[in-house]
Amino acid sequence: MPWLFYTAATRDGALERRNGRFADAAMLDRELARHGEMLVDYLALPDALHQVRQWALGRLRPLETAEFCNMLSMYVSGGVDLQSALADLESNATSIAYRQILGQVRTGLLNGYPFSQALRETHQFPEEVLALVKIGEESGTLDRVLADAGAHIERIEEIKSAVKRALVYPAFTLVVMIGGALFWLSFVMPKLALVFTSIDIEMPGHVAAMIAASDWVREFWWLLGIILVALPMGFFAARANEGFRYQTDRMAWHMPVMGRIVYGSQMAFWFQYLGLMYGAGVVITQAMEIINKSVKNRFFRDKIANFNARLQDGESLQASIKETRIFEPLAIRMVAIGEETGNLEAQMKKLAGIYFARVNALVEVLAKTLEPAMAIVMAAMLAFFVLGVLAPIYESIGKIGG
């Protein structure tokens, strides 16, 4: 089914350029006529070229999705119809990809799709947003669920941002250390090697090893560059393998400090998702299916994989999470209270807030701990290079002077 770019004459005589997937131009003409519009011209784009075009335009960013949900919620609550609201958002879109996606949603609505299906056809919106929109359509609460979805995405991005902050400083320090070591081996050590040769002194073993490393770096710098690029690329490529990804996620889960951040962020994700879906009226087994697909950590996903089977067998949610042996007593207790009092949504949102606050606190502690630790490591590395190499030279010069 080709992708058609077309110009349509609206009921008031205005010309609008749109695009969408149709079986042929005749189908497009019938759809437009059904809405009192007329096809002016069109261009058919083969599916392969459309895929290339979509790749070039890029995907909808999470914060753009949150903005879409929040703005559309305000339009809908104000009584504005979806087509008019989407047209306003499209005219004010800040990126080409966002503008194109809004145009696709409008075309889907013109083709008679429900709003949730029009969003699904773009392949840009996360499953939890699609599920919430469908619930909102059926229950007449589209404005509320859109606002909830926008707030949810913003909270998830805050959690992701906190985890990234925890990784930025050590990653930056590691890059600086590698760069400093390469600079020393490439430019400083060759000069010092000439000094050792000129004064004809015996080099200590560690100095000889550093000079040999310097010679290797200068001769095979291209191979070193390939290694430094290939290692991270190879790691991320290997993560495409489910077995490797599971093992690395499992290692991250059990790391001394970073593991607590991974644990807290995944718990915050999970309770945030589940509270949102449950509060919107999604059946808990269906919510579990959607959430499990959204969980990124494969180790955590494996632990919660049997939730639905347990729930369908009549187990309570509290008993199900207890059997996984990864949820803390606090989480188990609060879920049990929520089930007993019929206030599970509020308890889950409280737990999401607790874990989110814990992640933020861990990030702050980690940053404050790593700063002096990295400074000490860098100072030790500098002392090794400077004192380990220059001390023998000064000692030999002293002996010559004596």
Image (spheres, helix red, strand yellow):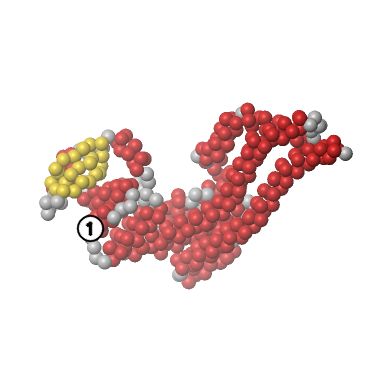
- Residue 93 appears at what percent x and percent y? 31, 53
Q: In which quarter of the image is residue 76?
A: bottom left
Image quadrant where one finds the C terminus:
top right
In the image, farthest residue toward the bottom: 341
- Tell me if residue 81 comes above or below residue 106 in the rendering: below
The residue where tag 1 is placed is 84
Tell me if residue 258 can be seen: yes
Residue 71 horizontal/vertical position (percent)? 32, 61
Camera-side residue of 362 and 388: 388
Q: In the image as oriented, which residue stretches furthest toward the front?
A: 401
Residue at 61% of width from left, 48% of height from top? 173
Which residue is located at x 63 percent, y 30 percent?
218
Nearest to the observer: residue 293 or residue 54: 54
Residue projecting furthest to the right: 402
Please say if 243 is above or below 131.
above
Residue type marked 1 = Ser
Q: Residue at x 49, y 49 (%)?
A: 296
Q: How many marks?
A: 1
Q: Residue 88: horizontal and vertical position, in percent?
A: 25, 57
